[in-house]
Image (cartoon, coloured by chain):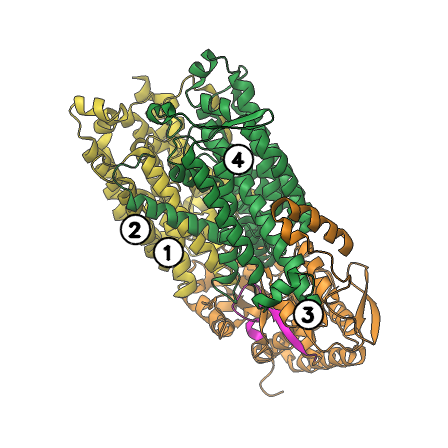
């Protein structure tokens, strides 16, 4: 019952963050103009800022946040490793390598053009990591997955660095992509990743009970009637589109997927169904809050979302970690 | 830096730990690898240090864009240079003049052995490249290495200092006089646009940014007597100032010079600069900027006064050749057709 | 997760010769000794090749003449002032990273353990970035910033993770993640706000580079390695016991917290000096202990073999980074990442069956 109340509270926090995200920004727009922009659009700079920039950006923030939060839960359950996050399983490195290839070697410069590359790169490198990490009869061993992820990420990062260090324009684009941002990604990015996120969230929604069983260890899971290999395959099948889609649209916003599930677990206990539900609401709330803060702090420019996410989230996360009584990893 | 004898002693000690036989051979003749030229002068560099340089340097290495620009403007013999800000070769606007000059330094730093192999008699750098002072110490062992000027110095002062280092002060004065007369000429052709406002935009990928007053392209526009829009008429922090797309109207003015350091470049060299320049800016304008909500509402865009320019010159720290490119772009866009 | 830190009773039961050097006694398995010798041989060959090749054209006879003290000035400069100190710096830095990585992996009981875990690498990156971008500093400022930032952050993480006088490994990891995330975002911010040239310079430093490294780098890191590595070796016996778990180790009479603190301090010191000399070269600290464990077939991260492996790995990587794409010389960090990553990928692919990670 308290967990359900908490979930409702999380939903309210997310709604508040979404309203703030539409109302506040680098450009001071009076509240009545905000309302007018949504109801009676007139192509004034204020109206453009609210309807054409902030609204799609807020929707993208909710989608990316939910995707990263749930992907983080899945990856931590999949690898049973507290370090697990899209970065560890090679997603960020794969997306980065693909983006750099697209911008530097193929000359695609508009963010909308390289979303597809990022998606493909992230998906491919995750698939490679999963394949390498899940050798033989035993299926995907958590530790092997983590090592495989690090290995693939290291190799890809070397490639990325080699390209950008010798191409200033690619480096220039890359450094902005690499901090992660919701600005300037627009409705195109959301349309591109939307189907992947929807698919991933649907699969994830069915996995809760299985993940709980597997969390106890493969043998105990089997004793409870779960099929660990199937569950893990499903978790990977959901985590790939979620993390790849989120990273493709917004860049590597690493901390959200890492920290929110841990924070959620502190409220819910180890039940993966609740952890995922909480994460799906709290992660976009964190992301939007950070995004709004970045717009206000960075005036007349903006602080990139990825920069603020950690500044907002990490102190909170450290407090939670310090309060955790025992390791529930 | 440890003295040469000191290095030898250190070499002997450190080497003994791992490779005794190698270290045993470190006592050789005690002198520098690059012989001092017969005729030499002493100049004071941008950090205030005195450096002895050849009276008439013949083999010059330039490790920064402004020193390359200036050395080429003075007709000096450059035998090695840097690959721009990380591009495969010299900046696009210098591509013609710098043809055939080998690249001996990337943004990853100077390649010391390649520089040694070029047998330079003078090495030039400045505050626009933040080279490791350990590396600069090594270079100074190869040939006199002069830190010509700090980043903040305006391009004329930096160029004058460069002229002194190269022993070509008369030629430098001549080049600057040429710039002044070109300014006067362009100014005379502006006609009814002489009092217009000019926005200088760098279209990066993260967000657009504007060049505030202290940057070289801004000073050149100011030399022409042109004004800046209110949002850009202030001092910045020495680099372009990002602007949120929500505040796109800060980019607006009577004219907008629109540059980007875009386009694919080939990391292995070759015609790397070719894709940059005006074409890259045109592409960024048509494929990205006009799709930004609100951009097409800007006055400059509606009046067809958005001018794609060569970002490699318009974002450079500058030199006489960059200044000429900038003046020419302004003249091409704004001068009265009849004049 | 406790991978590789558990002991293998079969292997343990096999008697091994004991190597004594004064107060330090190390049990040496024959295979470990053989691996150590082989790695040393690789390092020695790397030194010789590194002296002989480079962008400045020198034939092998010329190099030999120079080594004998009869080279011309340019050749002598290339060999003694450029190549020798550079390869020595690579070896020392690699050894420091290798040993500290092994310590971190054992203490954190995680195969991903590395100085990154306690935020050292991001902290030193922040320090160095502030040195490059805000103070406009030279190499001394950057190195100082890196070491200062790294130590400050490591201390901060340790203190934040400490509760009731005890630091649990998983809390250390999680707090390290949190603090690292903050700093990584600060680093990203600094990178996007700097002038492009400065940002790229900083990016090169963050990649890890040995370009222009001379005696002034080789000597300090060499001295610290000479002091720190034996220190870590002396502590490596309780380290093995710590792998059993805090309670078991405590029952065996090991002052768990003190040993862990001392070891971490030594590892942080090694990382600090190595980072100051070459930047946060990626993957060496992570890969060297893993490779060492694979080669020796021992479940423990053998500190000495890890250090030797790190040294050989970095020297070899630097040689390859300089020469493989000549005339373009890559920063070594580009190569250690790619090389180590590809090797681990290959290892995983080749030994999918029966590998225990």
Q: Nearer the viewer, mark 4 or mark 1?
A: 4
Looking at the figure, which quarter contains the N terminus of chain C?
Answer: top left
What secondary structure predominates along the stretch shown in magenta?
A: loop
Callout 3 touching callout 1 (CB < 8 Å) = no
> Chain A appears in which tint?
yellow
Image location of residue B210, percent across then percent down: 58, 60
Q: Is residue B87 magenta?
A: yes
The residue shown at (47%, 53%) is C335
| Left or right position of C54 against A120 | right
Mark 2 falls on what kind of element? helix
Disc 3/disc 2 C-alpha distance (Å) = 45 Å
Q: Is residue A166 magenta?
A: no
Disc 4/disc 1 C-alpha distance (Å) = 33 Å
| Residue identifier under label 1 | A98
Q: Are marks 3 and 2 on the same chain?
A: no
Callout 1 touching callout 2 (CB < 8 Å) = yes
Name the chain letter of the residue that bears numbered label 3: B
Task: Determine if residue A299 is in view.
Answer: no
Q: Are marks 4 and 2 on the same chain?
A: no
Question: What are the residue bounds of the magenta stretch?
Answer: B76-93
Q: Are marks 4 and 3 on the same chain?
A: no
Image location of residue B138, percent across then percent down: 69, 59
> Chain B appears in which tint?
orange
Mark 1 falls on what kind of element? helix
In the rendered structure, find residue C100 and report the number of the disc placed on it.
4
| Residue identifier under label 2 | A124
Name the chain letter of the residue that bears numbered label 2: A
Task: Determine if residue B76 is in view.
Answer: yes
Looking at the figure, which quarter contains the C terminus of chain C?
Answer: top left
| Residue identifier under label 3 | B67
């Amino acid at each position: 019952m308290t967990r359900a109340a908490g979930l409702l509270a999380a939903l309210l926090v997310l709604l508040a963050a979404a309203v703030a995200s539409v109302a506040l920004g680098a450009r001071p727009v009076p509240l009545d103009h905000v309302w007018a922009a949504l109801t009676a659009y007139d192509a004034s700079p204020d109206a453009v800022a609210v309807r054409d920039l902030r609204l799609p950006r807020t929707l993208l923030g909710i989608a990316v946040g939910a995707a990263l939060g749930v992907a983080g839960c899945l990856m931590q359950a999949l690898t049973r490793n507290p370090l697990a996050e899209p970065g560890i399983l090679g997603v960020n490195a794969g997306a980065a390598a693909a983006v750099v290839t697209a911008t530097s070697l193929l000359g695609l410069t508009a963010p909308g053009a390289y979303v597809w590359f990022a998606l493909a790169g992230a998906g491919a490198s995750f698939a490679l990591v999963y394949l390498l990490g899940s050798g033989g009869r035993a299926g995907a061993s958590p530790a092997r997955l983590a090592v495989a992820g690090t290995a693939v990420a290291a190799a890809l990062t070397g490639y990325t660095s080699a390209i950008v260090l010798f191409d200033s324009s690619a480096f220039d684009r890359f450094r902005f992509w690499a901090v992660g941002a919701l600005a300037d990604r627009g409705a195109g990015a959301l349309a591109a990743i939307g189907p992947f996120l929807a698919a991933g969230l649907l699969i994830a929604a069915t996995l809760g009970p299985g993940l709980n069983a597997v969390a106890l260890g493969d043998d105990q899971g089997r004793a409870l009637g779960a099929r660990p290999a199937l569950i893990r395959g499903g978790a990977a099948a959901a985590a790939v589109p979620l993390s790849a889609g989120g990273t493709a649209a917004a860049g590597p916003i690493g901390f959200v997927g890492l920290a929110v599930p841990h924070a959620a677990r502190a409220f819910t206990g180890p039940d993966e169904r609740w952890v995922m539900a909480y994460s799906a609401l709290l992660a976009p709330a964190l992301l939007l809050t950070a995004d709004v803060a970045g717009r206000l702090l960075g005036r007349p420019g903006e602080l990139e979302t990825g920069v603020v996410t950690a500044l907002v989230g990490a102190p909170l996360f450290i407090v939670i970690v310090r309060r955790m009584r025992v390791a529930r990893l | 830096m440890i003295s040469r004898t000191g290095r030898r002693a250190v070499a002997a000690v450190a080497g003994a730990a791992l490779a005794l036989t190698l270290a045993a051979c470190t006592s050789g003749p005690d002198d520098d690898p690059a012989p001092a030229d017969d005729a030499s002068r002493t100049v004071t560099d941008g950090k205030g240090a005195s450096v002895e340089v050849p009276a008439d340097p013949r083999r010059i290495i330039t490790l920064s864009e402004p020193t390359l620009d200036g050395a080429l403007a003075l007709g000096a013999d450059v035998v090695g240079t840097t690959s721009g800000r990380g591009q495969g070769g010299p900046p696009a606007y210098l591509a013609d003049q710098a043809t055939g000059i080998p690249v001996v330094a990337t943004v990853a730093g100077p390649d010391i052995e390649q520089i040694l192999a070029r047998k330079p008699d003078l090495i030039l750098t400045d505050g626009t490249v933040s080279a490791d002072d350990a590396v600069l110490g090594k270079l100074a062992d190869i040939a006199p290495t002069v830190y010509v000027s700090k980043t903040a110095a305006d391009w004329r002062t930096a160029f004058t200092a460069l002229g002194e280092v190269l022993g070509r002060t008369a030629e430098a004065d001549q080049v600057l006089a040429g710039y002044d007369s070109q300014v006067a000429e362009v100014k005379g052709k502006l006609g009814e646009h002489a009092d217009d406002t000019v926005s200088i935009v760098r279209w990066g990928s993260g967000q657009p940014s504007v060049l505030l007053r202290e940057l070289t392209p801004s000073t050149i526009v100011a030399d022409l007597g042109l004004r800046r829009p209110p949002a850009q008429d202030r001092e910045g922090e020495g680099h372009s100032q990002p602007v949120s797309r929500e505040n796109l109207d800060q980019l607006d003015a009577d004219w907008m010079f629109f540059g980007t350091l875009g386009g694919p470049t080939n990391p292995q060299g070759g015609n790397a600069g070719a894709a940059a320049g005006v074409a890259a800016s045109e592409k960024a304008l048509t494929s990205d900027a006009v799709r930004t909500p609100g951009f097409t509402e800007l006055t400059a865009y509606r009046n067809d006064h958005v001018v794609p320019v060569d970002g490699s010159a318009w974002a450079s720290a500058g030199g006489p050749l960059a200044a000429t490119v900038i003046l020419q772009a302004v003249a091409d866009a704004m001068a009265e057709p009849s004049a | 997760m406790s991978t590789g830190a558990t002991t293998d009773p079969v292997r343990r039961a096999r008697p091994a010769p004991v190597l004594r050097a004064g107060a330090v006694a190390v049990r040496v398995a024959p295979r470990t000794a053989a691996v150590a010798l082989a790695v040393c041989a690789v390092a020695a060959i790397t030194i010789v090749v590194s002296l002989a090749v480079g962008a400045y054209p020198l034939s092998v006879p010329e190099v030999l003449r120079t080594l004998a003290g009869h080279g011309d000035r340019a050749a002598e400069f290339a060999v003694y002032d450029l190549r020798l100190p550079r390869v020595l710096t690579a070896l020392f830095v690699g050894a420091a990273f290798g040993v500290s990585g092994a310590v971190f992996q054992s203490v954190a009981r995680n195969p991903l353990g590395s100085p990154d875990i306690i935020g050292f690498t991001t902290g030193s990156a922040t320090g160095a970035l502030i040195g490059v971008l805000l103070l406009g500093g030279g190499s001394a400022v950057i190195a100082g910033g890196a070491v200062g930032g790294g130590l400050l952050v490591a201390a901060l993480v340790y203190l934040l993770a400490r509760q009731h006088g005890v630091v649990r490994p998983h809390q250390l990891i999680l707090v390290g993640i949190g603090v690292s995330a903050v700093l990584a975002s600060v680093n990203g911010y600094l990178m996007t706000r700097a002038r492009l040239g400065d940002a790229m310079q900083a990016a090169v430093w963050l990649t890890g580079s040995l370009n222009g490294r001379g005696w002034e780098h080789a000597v300090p890191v060499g001295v610290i390695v000479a002091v720190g590595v034996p220190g870590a070796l002396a502590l490596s016996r309780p380290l093995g016991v710590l792998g059993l778990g805090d309670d078991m180790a405590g029952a065996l009479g090991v002052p768990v917290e003190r040993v862990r603190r001392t070891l971490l301090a030594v590892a942080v010191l090694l990382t600090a000096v190595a980072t100051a000399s070459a930047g946060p070269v990626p993957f060496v600290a992570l890969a060297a202990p893993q490779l060492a464990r694979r080669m020796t077939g021992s479940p423990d991260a053998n500190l000495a073999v890890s250090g030797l492996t790190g040294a050989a790995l970095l020297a070899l990587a630097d040689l390859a980074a300089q020469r493989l794409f000549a005339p373009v010389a890559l920063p070594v960090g580009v190569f250690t990442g790619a090389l180590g990553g590809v090797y681990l990928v290959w290892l995983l692919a080749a030994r999918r069956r029966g590998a225990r990670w």
